[in-house]
Image (tube, rainbow, N blue to C red):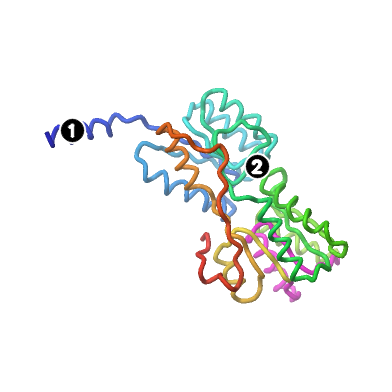
């Protein structure tokens, strides 16, 4: 009997359906995005019946749409993506839904209901909490430089909206916005231009720690005084900066990669799961930085 059960198990493994997941990633040039892909890879590796294909859009909406369309043409079972543009990308995702392909959105959403599961921390609330904390440190007076992420991405839109909503309550607070696309290299260029243009600011709200790291690099190189700053993601370099007194705070921001694969497994198993899943985040300051593990 024992050998018979082992035989049945072997047959089930050999002939089990393989489910193909297409991951249309924004870019692999960003360290956070690369970590997100790795988290998906690690979780997929735990499930023998799952196969992962990753495409790198190199930060271009047109490339991401092309990658998603290829996944549709290849009839993958699931598509995972973090849409670069919430409006444009939704058009091709509807094609996937209409063809019966399950769509999992992680960390960024779309402006329609054409997806099966959306998993992300609450970007709007993180930005509001960032503003409340940073503006208090400024005694509600001065100029805040906001380093914005990718134009059109829901994470960017919600982080900008949340921060500005709080800042608008204080007449002596001014917000100056510059786009650095979540990349430290772009933040370096932005900061160099700001100093050339003579634009002054008293604090920085960066929509990612990577951009804030790039900003600090320029400030140090040009021997400019560091200002109060808050970032998002809580990566290793942010932890170091917080403990060294070079950054006030950061917010943990799970990549949602593991949860995205877990959602796929649940869908395969015919389990009911929420359409929208909000992940918890924590504000990290000098008081708790040693107690919380950075994302990477």
Secondary structure category for the residue under label 1:
helix
Segment colored magenta: 198-227
Neighbour class for label 2 at 10 Å: few (<14), some, many (≥20)? many
Of residues 54 and 286, the one nearer the viewer is: 286
Dot 2 corresponds to which residue?
84
**Residue 240, percent across and down?**
57, 71
Of residues 250 and 38, the one nearer the viewer is: 250
| Circle number at residue 25 | none
Taking the magenta stretch, the answer to whether it contains residue 220 is yes
Neighbour class for label 1 at 10 Å: few (<14), some, many (≥20)? few
Q: Is residue 220 left or right of residue 38?
A: right
> Toward which corner of the image does residue 237 lie, by quadrant?
bottom right
Residue at x 52%, y 71% (from the top left corner): 290
| Circle number at residue 7 | 1
**Residue 154, percent across and down?**
68, 44
| Marks 1 and 2, the one that precedes in the sequence | 1
> Toward which corner of the image does residue 172 lie, by quadrant?
bottom right
Residue at x 68%, y 64% (from the top left corner): 230
Query: Tags 1 and 2 in contact by the CB under 8 Å rule?
Result: no
């Amino acid at each position: 009997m024992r050998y018979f059960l082992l035989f049945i198990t072997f047959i089930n493994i050999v002939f089990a359906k393989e489910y193909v997941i297409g991951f249309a990633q924004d870019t692999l040039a960003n360290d956070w995005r690369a970590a997100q892909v790795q988290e998906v890879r690690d979780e997929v590796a735990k499930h023998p019946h799952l196969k992962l294909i990753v495409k790198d859009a190199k930060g271009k909406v047109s490339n991401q749409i092309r990658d998603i369309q290829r996944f549709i043409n290849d009839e993958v079972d699931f598509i995972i993506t973090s849409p670069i543009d919430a409006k444009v990308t939704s058009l091709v995702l509807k094609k996937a839904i209409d063809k019966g392909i399950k769509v999992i959105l992680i960390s960024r959403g779309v402006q329609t209901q054409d997806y099966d599961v959306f998993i992300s921390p609450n970007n709007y609330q993180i930005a509001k909490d960032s503003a409340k904390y940073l503006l208090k440190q400024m005694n509600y007076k001065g100029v805040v430089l906001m380093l914005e992420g990718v134009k059109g991405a829901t994470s960017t839109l919600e982080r900008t909206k949340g921060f500005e909503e709080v800042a608008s309550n204080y007449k002596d607070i001014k917000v100056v916005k510059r786009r650095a696309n979540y990349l430290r290299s772009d933040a370096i260029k932005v900061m160099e231009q700001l100093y050339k243009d003579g634009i002054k600011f008293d604090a920085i709200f960066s929509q990612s720690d990577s951009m804030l790291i790039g900003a600090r690099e320029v400030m140090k190189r040009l021997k400019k005084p560091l200002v109060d700053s808050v970032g998002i993601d809580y990566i290793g370099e942010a932890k170091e900066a917080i403990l060294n007194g070079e950054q006030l705070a950061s917010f943990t921001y799970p990549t949602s990669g593991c949860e995205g694969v877990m959602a796929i497994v649940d869908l395969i198993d015919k389990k009911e799961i929420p359409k929208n899943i909000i992940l918890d985040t924590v504000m990290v300051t000098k008081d708790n930085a040693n107690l919380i593990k950075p994302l990477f």
